[in-house]
Image (tube, grey):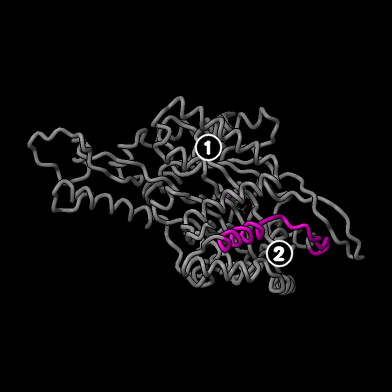
Amino acid sequence: MPDVRTVATWELRAEFARRLSSLYGHEVPAYNLLVEVCHEVNAEVLAREGAAAERLGSIGRVTAERHGAIRVGSAVELRQVARIFGALGMFPTGFYDLRDAYPNPIPVVSTAFRPTESAELARNPFRVFTSLLVVDDRRFFDASLEKRLTSFIGHRELFPPELLALADRARDGGLAGEQAERFLDLATGAFALSSSPVERAWYAELEAISAVAADIGGITTTHVNHLTPRVLDIDALYARMGARGIAMIDEIQGPPAWAGPSVLLRQTSFKALAEQRMFREPDGNVSPGELRVRFGEVEARGVALTAAGRERYDALTAETDRLFAAGTGASRQEIGAEVWARGFPSDEVSLARQDLAYFAFRVDPDRRRDGSAPPIDLAGLLDGEWVFAEPIVYEDFLPRSAAGIFSSNLTGPSSLSSTEQGQERDVTWLAEMLETDISAPEELYGAERARSLALVADRLGISAPVG
Ligand code: OOG
Ligand code: NI
């Protein structure tokens, strides 16, 4: 009998992630090697550390976990992306402005489409970092180029109407059987590398300003830029990829390797590989050539930081930069490890007590009841071991690391006018373009913590809210 059951949103999302992974592995074989080495390293960490290895997510979640990156050129295209990802239970979260990225400004603002509820993240956390070209930023594009870019982008169709209609239907009533299949086929196909020829002169004109601008506005299609698996020991992964002959970028972005808890996000990548593409010359001749835009990134995730924790992170990063620039001969990672050992709590409970990171608190069911009343403050509950703290995983991105990943993979720096002003862009503007709200990551983490505290209060019969 044909399967006519409505496919759950998370199943569509998980299947989309699997199909994209198989597509990307087909297109960029080095990605398959990266995934293979991730599996090797994850199995070793699991064997070595047991349950501790799953503290930041079950091995099932981590093994399936991917993030992709895509880039679009207009609000119309961005809204179409939102319809497709909305059908997969992925919603815009966070705002990133990469135009002031150092050393390479990138003419985009970005958000990430991802599941926002913890149960959905646990089922499948697939997320896509999505960038929108800022065509009217005069530091990059003069009035003539803006006009031509807008027109070029306005005339292309990235997503077939049938795909968008199926996406809307998925959100309205769900998709079953063949329709679900068709939706997944079309959605995956929309992000495949196109074989249609690239107009050489147009692409080159944009590339002279920014390779990312050319990748977005220089072609009539879109594609996954990278697809990133999650690894439990990124330092081991980095070393092993190098040993397997893959050229990695110079360093791991984000916090250093250090003895304390994993926080936020650490990322690295192998350099963009030459891919064969067809080019149309100004005389109409079509011939093969190559482009280097797609790369292979990998990430390790840690606990999400509160605003205070994030300030501490920024201060430690600035201190690491300062000492590294002073040139003592030590590597950035070595300096970072020392700076962190001096300036950051070395265990989770201290992070929780100092409110530097987000945790979900659970009542310890085994705590021996000695007749005493539980304290009503969080520190007391933690000290008395009434509750334990489970780290809330950081599900988002880091603008500085994103800039580092972008720029390690660019062939040349962006050329930027220093006399022009950039357009103001913020999360409100992007939400207006999207015609939908953009979730603030801190609010999602904060709400999860608050829910856990309400449950603790309830279970312990504490009337006053804790925390
Ligand atoms: C996105 C770069 C940012 C990350 O993981 O920080 C990113 C892009 O290259 O389009 O994916
Ligand atoms: Ni990425």
Q: Is residue 183 magenta?
A: yes
Mark 1 vs mark 2, foreground winner is 1
Identity of the residue drawn at 57% across and 38% down: 252
Q: Residue furthest front?
A: 1
> Residue 323: percent from the left, percent from the top?
52, 36
Q: Is residue 345 left or right of residue 71?
A: left
Q: Quadrant of residue 408?
A: top right
Camera sees residue 40: yes
Checking the image for residue 231, the label placed there is 1
Chain-order first, disc 1 or disc 2: 2
Q: Is residue 362 left or right of residue 242?
A: left
The residue where tag 2 is placed is 217
Amino acid carrying mark 1 in the image: Val
Q: CA distance from mark 1 to mark 2?
A: 33 Å
- Label 2 sits on a secondary structure element that is helix
Q: Is residue 117 left or right of residue 33?
A: left
Q: Is residue 110 above or below residue 34?
A: below
Identity of the residue drawn at 49% across and 33% down: 257
> Residue 456: percent from the left, percent from the top?
21, 47
Identity of the residue drawn at 64% across and 61% down: 186
> Residue 251: percent from the left, percent from the top?
60, 37
* Nearer to me, 398 or 198: 198
Residue extent of the magenta highlight: 178-202
Q: Residues within 10 Å of mark 1 (few under 14, many from 20)?
A: many
- Magenta stretch secondary structure, dominant: helix
Amino acid carrying mark 2 in the image: Gly
Q: Is residue 201 magenta?
A: yes
